[in-house]
Image (cartoon, rainbow, N blue to C red):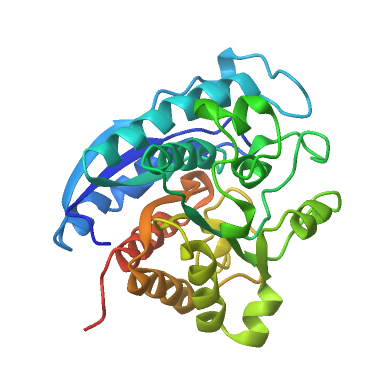
Amino acid sequence: MRPSGIAIIGAPLDLGGDRRGVDMGPSAVRVANLNRRVAALGYEVEDLGNVEVEQRESLPEGPRNARYLPQIARMCGRLARLVESALEQGKAPLVLGGDHSVAIGTVAGVSSYFRKREQTIGLIWLDAHADMNTPESSPSGNVHGMPLACCIGMGPPELTHLLGFSPKVQAASVALVGLRNVDMLEKPHVRTSGVRAFTMRDIDERGLPAVMREAVRIASEGAAGFHLSLDMDWVDPSDAPGVGTAVRGGATYREAHLAMELICDSKHMLSMEVVEVNPVIDEVNRTADLAVELVMSAWGKRIL
């Protein structure tokens, strides 16, 4: 489905991880001319600014196994309502993170909108990490390692029951693509949850087009469409050095664009977010620039 309008929402959250800087991700992506470049594809673009985020320096860390949990839950609630409101106005939400915790709010808002219309959504999650820890399994207590688990109903009730219902997405409608770094206690969650996980080995052996087409099928079947959650660490650090948690061996520049083009071809994408852009450790903003390129490919830019 090609919407006529796209609503850009910044979510400058950095409470979910240890490394500072991803709170500047929305600004870095906007500096890379996101609004103008997306508008050039023929969309009416409305930038709704940034969701209010509490600052780490003025906050207690809270529980060690889920640090800054109350503040993250409040911010995700605000984001969810903005996302749902954008959909009610006929616009496709494009959320700019921030760390990956923001996905809890984005997915809640999209899911709530379609739930009120007695429809479900699917989810394509592109990430080097599974993001399926819970407070009991997390080695760090960083909530940015938990958002996918929360979306399928595993984790703290403050996050799993955002907007009053859970799960936001059925596990069988989730495709997790590009895994190459999974915590030891997290692995059973991935294996037993019902989420379909594709590792980098799957991509190496089967090829990216086959994996992405299956991911689209999983996330689209029986659903109104799917939300795309793109962590920029899914791309190899040689092309995306400025990310929250870099892991070697990711998607190449062309594979990343091909994945976005195949998603666009499906015509089933309802909404999108791009997270974990960290300009503090980037090189002349090239990770943010790549993020904008990938957004454009997902929303319809073609070579010819």
Q: Nearer the viewer, residue 106 or 55?
A: 106
The spot of residue 45 in percent (x, y) is 18, 47
Can residue 110 be seen in this snapshot? yes
Residue furthest to the front = 118
Question: Where the N terminus falls, by quadrant?
Answer: bottom left
x 34%, y 58%: residue = 292
Position of 200 relative to 289 (above/below): below
Residue 297, placed above or below residue 174: below
Residue beneath the point at 50% across and 71% down: 217
Residue 59: image quadrant is top right
Quadrant that contains the C terminus: bottom left
Q: Quadrant of residue 151?
A: top right
Q: Nearer the viewer, residue 20 or 94?
A: 94
Residue 64, image x and y in percent? 78, 25
Residue 200 location (% of width, % of height) = 67, 73
Note whether residue 252 is visible: no
Q: Is residue 46 above or below residue 33?
A: above
Residue 245 position, x and y percent, is 63, 51
